[in-house]
Image (cartoon, rainbow, N blue to C red):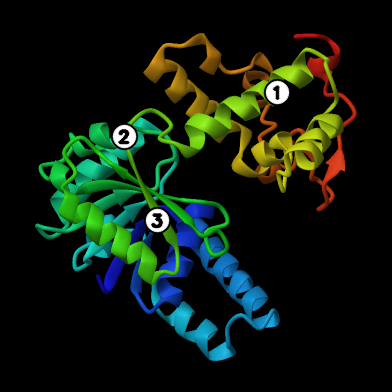
Amino acid sequence: MKKIAVIGSGTMGNGIAHVFAQHGHEVSLIDINEAALLKAKETISKNLDRQVSKGLITEEVKLNTLSNIKSFQDMKLGVADVDFVIEAATENIDGKIKIFKQLDEYTKPGVILATNTSSISITKLAAATQRPELVIGMHFMNPVPVMKLVEIIEGFKTSREVTKITVDLCKKLDKIPVAVYDYPGFVANRILMPMINEAAYTLYENVAGVEAIDTIMKLGMSHPMGPLQLADFIGIDVCLAILNVLYEGFGNQKYAPCPLISKMVTSGQLGVKSGMGFYDYSKGTKELIVAPNFVKHGV
């Protein structure tokens, strides 16, 4: 497992590439968008600088990590000689199915195809390939260089040997892998997203404000971050997508997305990445929004 390909250079993709490269792997970071690849390399460099400043790594480790990452816009070229692939593209099932069909065609026989999806069925993605036994979920947590957990998800046909290989690979990255089975939301988001959704409903129904909700969960439940602030960091659009997967997968009303979350996504208020979510990040710091218009007017 020396050569690793990472598909997608966004927040999760560049974090995954960073961790593998730091642990001595040759990484092909693949994205059709050249600007996204350049931004990813800048982000990785800044994150490595932060590790150096904290004394966690040396300057030599930083330089070696960066030299281990090569960027590709052509997927076929980027995965031609790799041993293991991790797809970390946008959380969209049609897009991921297309990518897995291409990976099945472009990679060598026997190459394991992993996905960093946070909710989409591993079994569905595997069915798009001729190697379903070699498809597995590898759900890293954000920020990848910091968070220890990796949720390993076995699809219906994933072989136990592939699970073992993936678990062992995670351990070599100094991560803690936990294996689960393929049901909507797996474990992490099946539990987390209803909490975020309920926090949004609590705000939407004017039970309490943003700061009050987050403070109660932080101080009362010992959460390091309140659910609404966490939603901002995950991305309100990502939360909505996962809730829709849960709702469609289980057919249970308790997973129906809060109208407030849907309205925020429609308006482009997506959290940190858009500069505005449940909090205002437009000035580079987190500031409280007293009451968004769609809460005040009871949409």
Disc sitting over residue 200 in the figure: 1
Residue to which mark 2 is pinned: 182
- The x and y percentages for residue 109 are 9, 57
Residue extending farthest to the bottom is 60
At mark 1, the secondary structure is helix
Helix, strand or loop at disc 2? loop
Q: Can residue 9 be seen from the camera position used here?
A: yes
The correct choice, above or below, for 198 with respect to 134 in the image is above
Side of 262 relative to 1 (left or right): right
- Determine which of the numbered discs, if any, sits on residue 106 in the image: none
The residues bearing labels 3 and 1 have C-alpha atoms spaced at a distance of 30 Å
Q: Amino acid at mark 3?
A: Pro
Q: 159 or 49, which is in the foreground?
A: 159
The percent position of residue 2, horizontal first and vertical second, equals 26, 74
Q: Earlier in the sequence, mark 3 or mark 2?
A: 3
Residue 177, numbered circle: 3
* Structural crowding at the residue carrying mark 3, measured as other residues with C-alpha within 10 Å and reported as few (<14), some (14–19) or many (≥20): many
x, y percentage for residue 136? 27, 47
Would you identify the image quadrant in which residue 220 lies? top right
- Looking at marks 2 and 1 on the same chain, the residue that comes earlier in the sequence is marked by 2
Badge nearest the viewer, 3 or 1: 3
Above or below for 229 versus 152: above
Label 1 crowding class (10 Å Cα cut-off): few <14, some 14-19, many 20+?
Answer: many
Q: Mark 2: few, some, or many residues within 10 Å (few <14, many ≥20)?
A: many
Going by the numbered disc 1, the residue's amino acid type is Ala
Q: Amino acid at mark 2?
A: Asp
- Measure how far apart labels 3 and 2 are at the Cα level: 15 Å
In percent of the image, x 83 and y 16: which residue is there?
207
> 192 or 25: which is nearer to us?
192
